[in-house]
Image (cartoon, rainbow, N blue to C red):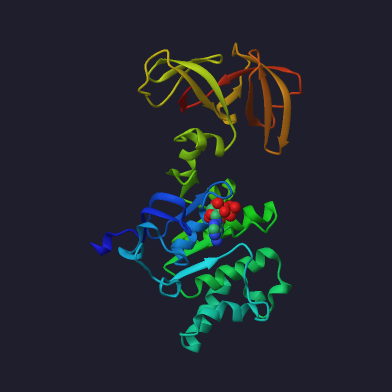
Amino acid sequence: MMASAPLLEAKDLSCGYGGQTVVSHLSFQLNKGEIVSLLGPSGCGKTTVLRVLAGFQPVFAGEVRVNGAPVSTPSATLPTEKRQVGMVFQDYALFPHLSVAANIKFGLHNRSATEADAKLKDMLELTGMTAYANAYPHQLSGGQQQRVALARALAPDPVLLLMDEPFSNLDAELRSRLSLDVREILKKRGITAILVTHDQNEAFAMADHVGILHGGGLQQWDTPYNLYHEPANRFVANFIGRGALLPGVLTTHDSVETELGVIRGNRAYPWNPQQAVEVLIRPDDLVFDDTSPQKAKIIDKIFAGSSTLYRLLLSSGRKLEALTPSHQDFPINAEVAIRLKAEHLIAFKK
Ligand SMILES: Nc1ncnc2c1ncn2[C@@H]1O[C@H](COP(=O)(O)OP(=O)(O)OP(=O)(O)O)[C@@H](O)[C@H]1O
């Protein structure tokens, strides 16, 4: 039975501070080698959950299991040092007076010198920091310091790696590059990891599954693709990506009449025909198409290199956004013909 247990399992977990519950009824599982992200707005409890998983604080209810064995229950909390978790924080937390090599070897005091040296060499290579073994943290860039922090966290072969906003002190470009690099490093070694972030690009770039936390609970646990294209509720629809909600009326269980025509989707809704709904329109659901009878006026555009985001005004006065390849270049105030090209019909009852 133990062999088939998930690597990490949170079951109906409630946690918080003092008597104050921050997150309740949280359940999720991670298999070995999986990378997941807990994503949510500031204050939703991401760090609190991570602290529970690390063993820094107790659970009020529910339990956490690692490889089938309970590590947190309301009556017992296995201490951090016995959990074999590695941690990477926002502020790097490297020892300033120790060299890169000594930082990485810090958690290896119970290994033989030969073993520790081999591990150091391996970690330096894995994180691309071999040339900096003798440098001190203040001589490194933020991105390099975070690579060392990762090497230090991975050196003792943790069962689980916990990362709390690891890239938020870095500029946007470095952040996106490093998040891909770190994913590659973790995948190469089959490391199971949880990343806490409020940055959806980071979560999407790194994680196999993402849990959206809000309002004291989990709103959706899904792949990045599904969170974007098949959000489970209005909160997720608004929180993830860009988009607008367009009013419409359900005509059959899987089609909605809107001012852009009838939208037919890939799922059936249980509501009666004529039910008033709102349909989620993502910017990439709209295409410019000269043959379409639907007209819109361009009121703004944001050029982003390979693509352009257009803000459009419909004749009803409603506004939508369209994301197109940047060769399709139109001036502000131009009238364009648009067509909906959505494969997913995401409707919410009005
Ligand atoms: N030590 C503490 N004592 C009491 N309440 C706390 C403590 N730490 C956090 N909280 C509260 O718990 C809630 C969740 O905090 P938490 O830090 O887990 O959120 P978060 O989602 O990680 O937010 P952020 O993205 O801003 O870091 C917040 O309302 C916060 O004020």
Q: Farthest front residue?
A: 19
Residue 196 appears in the figure = no
Q: Could you say which quadrant of the image residue 152 lies in?
A: bottom right
Q: Position of residue 43 (x, y in %)?
A: 56, 50
Quarter occupied by the N terminus? bottom left
Q: Residue furthest bottom?
A: 113
Q: Is residue 177 above or below residue 244?
A: below
- Vertical arrangement, residue 71 with respect to residue 42, above or below: below
Residue placed most toward the observer, 324 or 21: 21
Asked if residue 144 is positioned above or below residue 274 in the image, the reply reads below
Side of 118 relative to 67 (left or right): right
Residue lying at 57% horizontally and 77% vertically, measured from the top left: 104
Farthest residue to the top: give it.
293
**Image coords of residue 105 (percent x, y):** 55, 80
Q: Nearer the viewer, residue 119 or 240?
A: 240
Task: State whether residue 153 appears in this view.
Answer: yes
Residue name at image x 64 percent, y 56 percent: 168
Q: Is residue 98 left or right of residue 76?
A: right
As rendered, which of 107 and 218 lies closer to the eye?
A: 218
- Answer with the quadrant where ligand 1 appears in the image: bottom right
User: Residue 254: horizontal and vertical position, in percent?
Assistant: 40, 20
Q: Position of residue 225 (x, y in %)?
A: 48, 40
Total numbered circles: 0
Q: In which image quadrant can residue 274 be found?
A: top left
